[in-house]
Image (cartoon, rainbow, N blue to C red):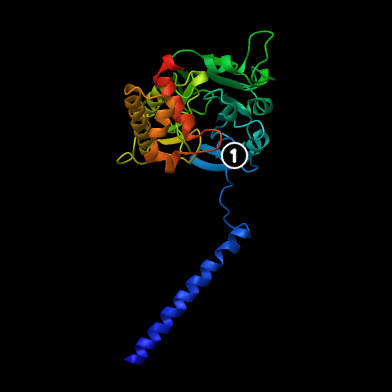
Amino acid sequence: MSGMLARRAQSMAAIVCGAVSALATVPDAWAQGRGNPPAPGAGRGATTSEVRVLQVRPNVHMLSGAGGNITVLTFNEGVLLVDTGTAQMAPAVLDAVKRLSDKPIVHIINTSATSDHVGGNETLASSGKRIPMEVVAGEGPMIVAHENVMTRMSAPTGKQAAAPERAWPNETYHLDMMKLSTRFHGGEAIELLHAPSAHSDGDTLVWFRKSDVIATGDIFMTTSYPIVEVASGGTIDGVIDGLNRVLEIAFPDNRSEGGTMIIPGHGRLCDMADVGYYRDMVTIIRARVQDLIKKGQTLEQVKAARPTRDYDGRFGATTGPWTTDMFVEAVYRTLTPARK
């Protein structure tokens, strides 16, 4: 019996030594570049030579790594893009699109005027064509956005515009929604839904009704708290209204999971449940800030109270282009317009 126990002890010792040895090799694996983690700060608008492609539906793909996420719809006559990433990444985006289809880019939809969503407009539009090509030969693709996007990208005569003219939308809408015909989009019913005063004053949700995919732009993301551009008309109430709109038109497979695929402005592919959790988080933080405002607290006191504390581990940031303090300040200022 004692011999059996001794053999078991030797066996356990060998297993432990093997495990320690395996752990000891992990730093070497990182050093050799196998599975390296993302570089610090490689978040919103990060510059990288890699554009990642994910198939969402048979003819719908999500491109990430070019700034904001890009949605690609391919069909017989051409390619439609929702957003175009940053200007620096436009050549890499074009290469990725060419791998998905040998057809030209014929339509671009912009979800806002933010540079990491419209920066590639000029380069990608210059490479494309308009359909029907036999009628409008020589014309570039249609660039569609809410009219407030056009206002922010252009400028009055004699003033410096925020973007080159070739990058501007050449078709805008000003109502609550706009429908694109199925004739020149591969039979896909595409609905543009204006989300007023959300991330900005020109946000558009893009709903591919046949494919059951929604591109949200910066109203929804998985990498940070909502980016509320107060100077561009954004408000926390508008963000929550926009998230609720997504939940209204999305359908689940089961228990809020699966079903409608949702492409956020930044981050991973999502479904209805992800949007629901995010909406609840933002609503809770808004209620906390509202309560502190009712108690007469200043902005600095509200920040010190840390109304986001439960969620900072998942969405918070102390450095970079959008910090937790910036988010709290945006919430505070849009809930107290008199104090801006």
**Observer able to see residue 131:** no
Identify the residue at the far top of this view.
157
Rendering coords of residue 157 (x, y %) = 67, 8
In-front residue for pair 131/244: 244
Could you say whether the residue bearing mark 1 is in a helix, strand or loop?
helix
Residue 302 occupies which quadrant of the picture?
top left
Rendering coords of residue 333 (x, y %) = 44, 21
**Observer able to see residue 225:** yes
Q: Amino acid at mark 1?
A: Leu
In-front residue for pair 179/237: 237
Position of 286 relative to 258 (above/below): above
At a point 58% along the width and 40% down the height, the residue shown is 65
> Is residue 58 shown left or right of residue 39?
left
Rendering coords of residue 24 (x, y %) = 54, 68
Identify the residue at the far left of this view.
255
- Assign the N terminus to one quadrant of the image: bottom left
At a point 39% along the width and 22% down the height, the residue shown is 237
Residue 124 occupies which quadrant of the picture?
top right
Residue under numbered circle 1: 100
At a point 31% along the width and 41% down the height, the residue shown is 254
